[in-house]
Amino acid sequence: MSGRLQDKRVLVTQCSAFMGPAVVELFRAEGARVVADDRDLRAPGACERAVADAGELDVLVANLAHPPEPSPVEQIQDTDWHTLFDMLVHPLMRLVRAAAPALIARRSGKIVVIGSAAPLRGIARNAAYCSARGAQLAFVQAAGLELAPHNVQLNAIAQNYVQNSTYFPDGLLASERFQRHLERNVPARRTAEGWESAELALFLASNKSDFITGQVIPFAGGWA
């Protein structure tokens, strides 16, 4: 490896879920000092403590995940709706709010959000999930504009069909039904491996992406 994040201090949230394992592995291989955090970010003050406990950050990777809770729109439960926003939306704002002052003061820093391509196209029976993921992307686009003048870059990966234990576990990938679904719906006709998404996250976390901010980057094999 080439040390693309050599000695950068990086906080990765929900490190054992979604893209956390792939990001932690690649970033450490590239020389980063990764703080792999797995605390429940719904608890009052948890996001602020995660940022404070990580020390002087160069990079925040807001890796946030929760199962979709699918249902027809007329049957969406308030509890499912609130859970998705409590897991995916509110922690993102709080993490960025906590990390931003130090990054702004130092005039240097990266925030990478691992999000979903679901709101870019919409998925039937998943209006609640698409709404929560869409709120993440809207926040990135607006907050990224505010941070840009301070040389702090905030961007999101809007991914789908990427191998991970939360949404696309091995058992699902191996099923014939899912393989037929890929053939019909994903132009690339395959899923991405976790390291491929982690490579995009690493690029956005590096100084090679200094002119990219407030952007939502689809990563879904042509699906979005």
Image (spheres, helix red, strand yellow):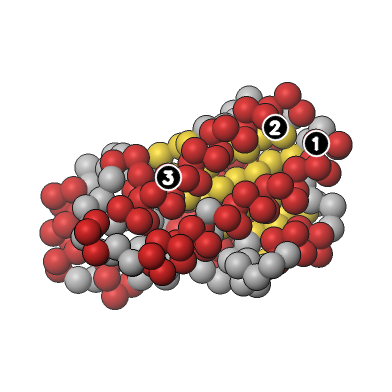
Crowd band around label 1 with a 10 angstrom C-alpha radius: few (<14), some (14–19), many (20+): some
Quadrant of residue 162 in the image?
bottom left
Q: Indicate the amino acid at tag 1.
A: Ile
For residue 54, above or below residue 139: below
Q: Answer with left or right where residue 205 lies relative to residue 83.
A: right
Q: Residue at x 83, y 44 (%)?
A: 102
Residue 72 or residue 190, whichever sits in front: 72
For residue 185, above or below residue 35: above
Instruction: Return the mark for residue 51.
Output: none
Q: Which residue is mark 2?
A: 147
Q: Residue furthest bottom?
A: 171
- SS for callout 1: helix
Q: Indicate the amino acid at tag 3.
A: Gly
Q: Residue at x 28, y 45 (%)?
A: 122
Quadrant of residue 42 in the image?
bottom right
Q: Which residue is mark 1?
A: 104
- SS for callout 2: helix
Q: Residue at x 27, y 70 (%)?
A: 172
Q: Residue at x 63, y 62 (%)?
A: 13
Q: Which of the two labelled residues, at mark 2 and mark 3, occupies the earlier sequence position? A: 3
Instruction: Return the mark for residue 134.
Output: 3
Q: Is residue 1 visible to the viewer in this orientation of the structure?
A: no
Q: How far apart are the alpha carbons under marks 3 and 1?
A: 26 Å
Residue 90 or residue 16, whichever sits in front: 90
